[in-house]
Image (tube, rainbow, N blue to C red):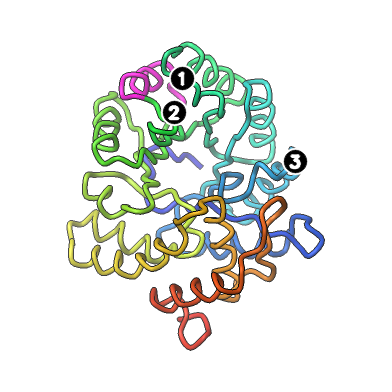
Amino acid sequence: MDLTGIGGIWPASLTPFDRDGAVDEAALTAHLGHLAAAPGVRALVVNGHAGETSALDRAERQQVVRIARAVAGAATGVVAGIVAEDPRAASALARDAREAGADALLLFPPLLFAGGAEARPEMVLRFFAAVAEAAPLPIVLFQLSRASGLGYAPELLARLLREVPSIIAVKEGSEIPAAYEDNLLVLRDCGRQVSMLTSNNTWLLASLAFGGDGILSGIGSVAPGILAEMHDAAARGDLAAARRANDRLRPLVRVFYRRPSLDMHNRMKTALNLMGLLPNPAPRAPLLPITEGERAEIRRALVASGLLAGGEMAA
């Protein structure tokens, strides 16, 4: 599927494990099927932070992509996260993803870039070029916060778009509204179609108000319908409807995106378990299961958002 110019909702999926800690293929198939069937979902994103990809070995990552491809069919895209610390490993993962049927790659910056990659732009360009050459698939660039050192300044972003034509979208998580707006202007001025997919999870509505083509986020694994309502309302300029959707989303945002941030997707697994959509919410070590007290808070947030009614999943 050609994802060029495609916006809408791109949920960053979770990876279920069974009681022995292995990838639970049946639960993953059901999870991805539920997401693919949700109105407004245009692509399934696997092997990202939400999918605990750093805890998966190479074979498991390819296994996840294969399952996603089988579930998605022809109507929904499959985007494979590429998380690696050097171009050789990233290229190997990219080739695996292509072989397994991915439509595009979500290319994460190596943690090494946090040490000042913007001062060595050729290093960044070579990293992208190596992956693009290894697996000729469209690339979604992952733009993290500038404070983390893993975001690209507008000048470098513009150069990447010029010199790596396979980049078709940006997963934008700069965390600062002014930076988001600057990056959006770079995309609009680059001379070709590059989609802006916001992942600024604590201010999704505000980012859509600036402009944008879609939402790529782990919270889409729990509430794809709410995200679709908000996105569609913002796109048609219906601020009142967008605010109503945001009001439903807010309790989930508050309970998922708080300290310690390493548990954010762990909390989402617990939410799906409470909704009857995931048999085993346990993450893979070294992450620990959610405490009973936090589980109760997640339940209250689901009720407040309308996703649970009387302890059961709302229609």
77 on left or right of 8: right
86 on left or right of 248: right
Q: Residue at x 50, y 71 (%)?
A: 298
Disc 2 or 1, which lies upstream in sequence?
A: 1
- Which dot marks residue 57? 3
Spatial separation of the CA atoms under disc 3 and disc 2? 26 Å
Q: Which residues are magenta?
A: 153-166
Disc 3 or 2, which lies upstream in sequence?
A: 3
Residue that mark 1 sits on: 116
What crowding class fits label 2: few (fewer than 14 Cα within 10 Å), some (14-19), or many (20 or more)? some
97 on left or right of 201: right
Q: Are marks 3 and 2 in contact (CB under 8 Å)?
A: no
Amino acid type at circle 3 is Asp
Residue that mark 2 sits on: 149
Amino acid type at circle 1 is Gly
Q: Residue at x 52, y 37 (%)?
A: 106
Q: Position of residue 213 (x, y in %)?
A: 32, 45
Q: Secondary structure at mark 2?
A: loop
Q: Position of residue 170 (x, y in %)?
A: 40, 35
Spatial separation of the CA atoms under disc 2 and disc 1? 7 Å
Q: Are marks 2 and 1 in contact (CB under 8 Å)?
A: yes
Q: Secondary structure at mark 1?
A: loop
Q: Is residue 2 magenta?
A: no
